[in-house]
Image: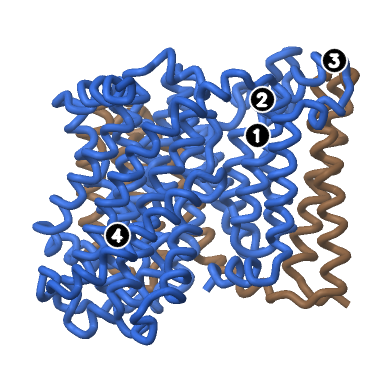
Amino acid sequence: MIRSSRDFWSGLIYIFFGVSAMAVARDYGMGTGAKMGPAYFPTILGALLVVIGVISIVRSFTLHGAPIGAFAFKGLVLVCAPVLLFGIIVRGAGLAVALPLLVVISAAASVHFRWRTTLVMAAGLTIFCALVFLKGLGIPLPVVGPWFGG
Amino acid sequence: MELLGHLLLGLQTAASPVNLFYCFIGVFLGTAIGVLPGLGPTATIAMLLPATFVLPPVSALIMLAGIYYGSQYGGSTTSILVNLPGEAASVVTTLDGHQMAKSGRAGAALAASAIGSFFAGTVATFLIAGFGPPLAAAALKFGPAEFFSLMVLGLVASVVLAQGSLLHAIGMVVLGLLLGLIGTDVNSGTQRFTFGIFELADGIGFVTVAMGMFGLGEIIRNLENEDARSVMISKVTGLWPTRDDFKRMVAPILRGTAIGSALGILPGSGSILGAFAAYSIEKKVSKNRAEFGKGAIEGVAAPESANNAGAQTSFIPLLTLGIPSNPVSALMVGAMIIHGIQPGPSVLNEQPALFWGMIVSMWFGNLFLVVLNYPLIGMWVRMIMIPYQYLYPGILVFCAIGVFSLKNTEFDVYFMALFGVIGYVFSKLGCEPAPMLLAFILGPLMEEYLRRALLLSRGNPMVFIQRPISLTLLAMAVLAMCTVLIPTFSKTREGLKD
C-alpha cells in the first residue's frame, strides 16, 4: 500500500535515471581510481541515485506524505508547447508569425484570457522584439521568414 | 591602510559613469522584478544573462549583482503593502510589515525596511572587503582535494536549506550533477550522454536549465492558483517614521545585520535563513514582544536588515572561493565563466579591479535603492497591480528569444521547454529545483577536482580525510546534515514551506 505517492513516483524517477546513467556509461571506459575514465563519476552518481530512489520507494510504503495534487495539464501544455512551436517555426516563418503565436497560445492558459488585449499585447511585443533584438542586438532571425517569401 | 587602497581602486572602477549606469539599471530592474508578482530573481537573471554578454565583464557582474540585492528590496515593498512576498527572503516581513500598513503606518514600515537595508548593506560591503582577501589567500593553498570537499560542503548546505524533504533535495543534487556531465568529457574527449545529438556536445547550457526550471516552471505553478491572487493595496501614508520608531529600530537593525551577515557567509544559505533567524530572535529579546504579529516595527527592521546583509555576504564564498551558495550566485559563476573569468581565489589577484569594483558597487547600489524606493513608491505600487495574465506571455517571449540568442540555435529553445516540464513535474513531487541547478553547474568542476585529487593520491580515496582542511570541510558538511535532525531546526525548515 503506497502511503506517499510523492515519494513513490520520485523514487521511480531517480531509479530510472540512475540505472540509465550506469547503463549508458558502460560504453565509456571506467578507468581506475588513480586514472578516472569518463564512466567513473557517472557510474558513482548513478549508483547513488539508485540508492536514493530505493530509500524513497521504501519510505513511500511506511511514511505518510502529502498527496501529489492535481496536475495542471492545461497550463503545462499551453506554456511549454508554444515555446516548442516557436523554436520549430521561427527560422522558417519568421518572428512576425512565431512570436504572436507564442503570445496568443500561452495567454490562453490564463482564466482571464481576452482576445482583444492579447492581440494588442502580441503586436506590441512583436514590434518591440523585432526592433530591440533583431535590429538592435543583431540576433540572426528573420522578421518574415522564407516560408512567406521573406 | 591596504584596505583603503583596495577600496579606492574599487571606487575608481565602480564610480565610472558606465558602471554607475549599469549598477543603477541592475537595482532598478531588480526592484521591479521583486515587486512584480510571480517573477523571481533566478529566472530574471537567467533571462537577462544573454543581454550582458555584450558588456565588459565588470559592468555585467555589477549589473547582475544589482538585480539580486535589488530584488530582495522590491520583495519587501510588496510584503508590506500587499502582503505578497515577492521573494522567499521577505516572507517574514509580511508578518508585521503588512499589519503596520493596515493600520496606516505603511510609510514607517517602508522606512524601517529602507534604513535597515541600507545600514546592513553598508556593513556587509565592509565585511566583504575585510574578509575577502584573507579567505582568498587561504583558498590559494587549496589543492584539488580541498576544492572537492568544499563543493561537497556547498551542496550539502544547499540541501539542508532546501525546503521540504531532505531525501529529495539530495536526489535532486545527484541528478543535477549527472545532468551537468552531459557533453564532451574534457579528459578523454568522449561524448557522454549525448545520444548522437550534435548540439549536446557542449552540454546543456545552465541558462537553458535555469530558464526552463525557474522561468517556465514558475509560470505554470503561478497559473495553477491564478484566482487566489487578489490584491488589496493599503494606502501609503506617513512616509516618515516618528522619533519613537527610530528609537525602536536601532537595536533590531544592529542585531539583524549581525545575524544576516553571519548566516549569509555560510555556503548554501543566502538571505532566507538570516531573515527567519533575525525575526525569531527579535521576537524573543524585544521589549515589545507582545506587539509582534500586530505591527511591531522591530519585526520589519530586523529581518529586512538581515536579508539584505545576507544577500550581500553570500558573495563572499562566490568571490573568494568560486563556490556559488544559491541559484543566483550559481548563475553568476556561469556568467563569469562565459566572460572568461575562472571564479576562485585567483580572481582577487588577477582581476583586482573586478573584485573591488564589484564590492564598492554594492554600496552604490544600496544607495540607489534608498533613493529609488522612496520617490518611486507610487510607481512600484502601480506595478504590483499589473495583472499576471499580461505579464507571463511577455516573460515567455523574452525567455524564448533570450535562450535562442545564446548560441543562435533553436535547440536550446526545445530544451528550455523540456526543462519547464521537468521543473513542474518535480515541484509537484515535492522536489526543489534550486539544489539541482547548483549541482548542475558544479558537476563538471567536481568531477575534475575528484579526478585530480585521486590522481595525486594514486587512487587512494582516503586523501579527502587525511588532509586537514579537506577533513574540516567534510566534517562541517556532516555537521550541517546533522542539524536537520535537530527538532527545532527541522521545524523552522518545514515552516519555510508555508
Type of the residue with mark 2: Gly
Upstream in the sequence, badge 1 or badge 2? Answer: 1
The chain ID associated with circle 2 is B
Q: Are marks 3 and 4 on the same chain?
A: no
Q: Are marks 3 and 4 in contact (CB under 8 Å)?
A: no
Tag 1 secondary structure: helix
Left or right placement of residue A75 versus residue A99 in this view? right
What whole-number distance in Å separates the C-alpha atoms at marks 4 and 1?
36 Å
Q: Where in the figure is residue B145, as x and y percent of width and height?
A: 73, 25
Counting from the top left corner in percent of width and height, residue B210 is at 50, 43
* Location of residue B127 (image quadrant): top left
Chain shown in blue: B
Between marks 3 and 1 in the image, the one whose residue lies nearer the viewer = 1
The kind of residue tagged 4 is Leu
Q: CA distance from mark 1 to mark 2?
A: 24 Å
* Between marks 4 and 2 in the image, the one whose residue lies nearer the viewer: 4
Q: Which residue is mark 4?
A: B36
Q: Which residue is mark 1?
A: B150
Q: Is residue B18 visible in the rendered structure shown here?
A: yes
Q: Nearer the viewer, mark 1 or mark 2?
A: 1
Mark 4 vs 1: CB contact within 8 A: no
Q: Residue at x 31, y 63 (%)?
A: B76
Distance between the Cα atoms at labels 3 and 4? 51 Å
Labels 2 and 3 in the same subunit:
no
Q: Are marks 2 and 3 in contact (CB under 8 Å)?
A: no
CA–CA distance in space, label 4 to label 2: 36 Å
- Residue A23: which quarter of the image? top right
Query: In terms of sequence position, does the residue under pointer 4 or pointer 2 come before the other?
Result: 4
Residue behind mark 3: A35
